Image (spheres, rainbow, N blue to C red):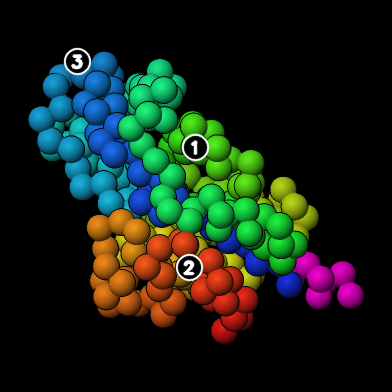
Amino acid sequence: MVAREQSAVTLVLWDIDHTLIETRGVGRAIYDRAFPAATGRRLEQLAQISGRTELDIMAESLRINGIEPTEGNIANLAAALVQGYEHTRDELADKGRTLPGAKEALQSLAADARFHQAVLTGNLREVARIKLEVFGLNSYLDLDSSSYGDDDASRSALVTIAQQRAREHTGQSFDNAHTVLIGDTPNDIQAALTAGVRVIGVASGKSTTEDLREAGARDVLEDLRQIEALRVFLGAHR
């Protein structure tokens, strides 16, 4: 009986940027300030960000700006980024926003014992925490059962990390059939498919519903205001 009750709980892993929130340019401004603070050089070019982990983004950004992506250089840049977000909370709150339906969707699932909500994000752990705190979303999510962009450079590897942390933190086991990743990019979709878990695409970022379906998403939402559709997708154990 206990095993059946535990297996009925679904781990819901939320992407953050362009799924739950938008920084509306604040994130790029922080990178522009953090890069020279960490390296002594101006950021001439930033790596493509969408759907990637911060470890991957930092390494490529250092490389294309002529700096060796050593562990030390990556650590310095990560520290500068966290400090940048910490010092820019008010600006982020003023210029950024929670995406339509995001808070309501989190509230709806938080009130349902069948779901355990956590995060799977390319953000650094501390940056993710700051963003969620700024927009008042952190209370709906178990950040200890989550995985972050400084855990592994591969987004698909973050799925297993989150499952392991959720098991350790809750005492429940979340198999692939009871793990769902929700994100807005083809990279989110590919990460879920590679890891073998279910996925829901949300066309709240730059990718269209067609883009997400072409990437392999079977279930796609226009945005998170479609809460009933979201619940249907989550409740359909396929």
- In the rendered image, which residue does mark 1 sit on? 135
Q: Residue at x 27, y 67 (%)?
A: 208
159 above or below 16?
below
**Kind of residue indicated by mark 3:** Gly
Is any atom of residue 234 visible in this view?
no
Location of residue 188 in the rendering, given as x and y in whole percent from the top left corner: 38, 61
Location of residue 147 in the rendering, given as x and y in whole percent from the top left corner: 52, 48
- In the rendered image, which residue does mark 3 sit on? 40
Is any atom of residue 184 visible in this view?
yes
Real-space Cα distance between discs 2 and 1?
A: 20 Å
**Kind of residue indicated by mark 2:** Gln
* Disc 1 secondary structure class: loop
Q: Quadrant of the C terminus?
A: bottom right
Quadrant position of residue 112:
bottom right
Q: Residue at x 67, y 63 (%)?
A: 115
Q: Residue at x 56, y 71 (%)?
A: 228
Span colored in magenta = 1-7
- In the rendered image, which residue does mark 2 sit on? 226
